[in-house]
Image (tube, rainbow, N blue to C red):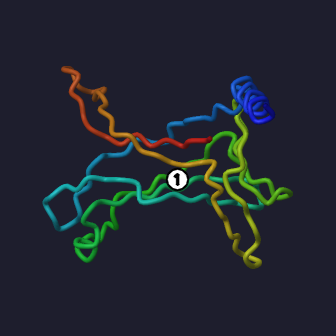
Amino acid sequence: MKTFLGSAIFLALAFANPASAGAKIKIDTVPDTYTPQNYNRSERVRISGFHFEVNSERTRTRVVVTYTYRDRISYSSADAGGGPPSTEVEIPGLTYDAAAHAIIYDANGTKAVCATVREKNSHHLAIRNTGACTVTAVDARHVDPKSWNNDQYSVLDTYFNVQ
């Protein structure tokens, strides 16, 4: 009986609190293919990872998303361009709280600790993701705004997600 009552209370609280719904924020649209320099074949682009950067003097935080392509190792010596460019974006509501030693997202009724921060040395911070905030990419088709015939092109829409 205690287990059932506890579960019922937990479920009631979970559905009654809209702040726990999370957030999904579009942060960029990037080409879905990349052609390495000195090569004529396009490769599919995907996210290779993301991390947070902090300007501790200004309590500013940004997300950096790095992209890769399938055969990057094969082309790395020929690809002087270094691959698809990264996305670097400051997200409204994402800040560094020095007192809490954390990167916190707090906007539109959603609050989460995205990463913990500790001082590594006098010039560097060690940032560890908590998993509450992630970055994902979705294949999408967009209409070319300059096209008379509504021509479409394929892209990756990149999102910052808060649990």
In the figure, residue 47 lies in which quadrant? bottom left
- In the rendered image, the residue lying farthest to the right is 99
The residue wearing badge 1 is 88
Q: Circle 1 sits in a helix, a strand or a loop, which is it? A: strand
Q: Residues within 10 Å of mark 1 (few under 14, many from 20)?
A: some
- In the rendered image, the residue lying farthest to the left is 40
Taking the image as shown, residue 13 lies to the left or right of residue 69, namely right
Give the position of the N terminus as an image quadrant: top right
Q: Position of residue 10 (x, y in %)?
A: 75, 32
Q: Position of residue 130 (x, y in %)?
A: 65, 56
Kind of residue at disc 1 = Glu
- In the rendered image, the residue lying farthest to the top is 149
Taking the image as shown, residue 77 lies to the left or right of residue 48, namely left
Q: Residue at x 15, y 58 (%)?
A: 41
Residue 72 in the image: above or below residue 22: below
Q: Residue at x 70, y 44 (%)?
A: 105
Give whichever of 102, 163 is nearer the camera: 163
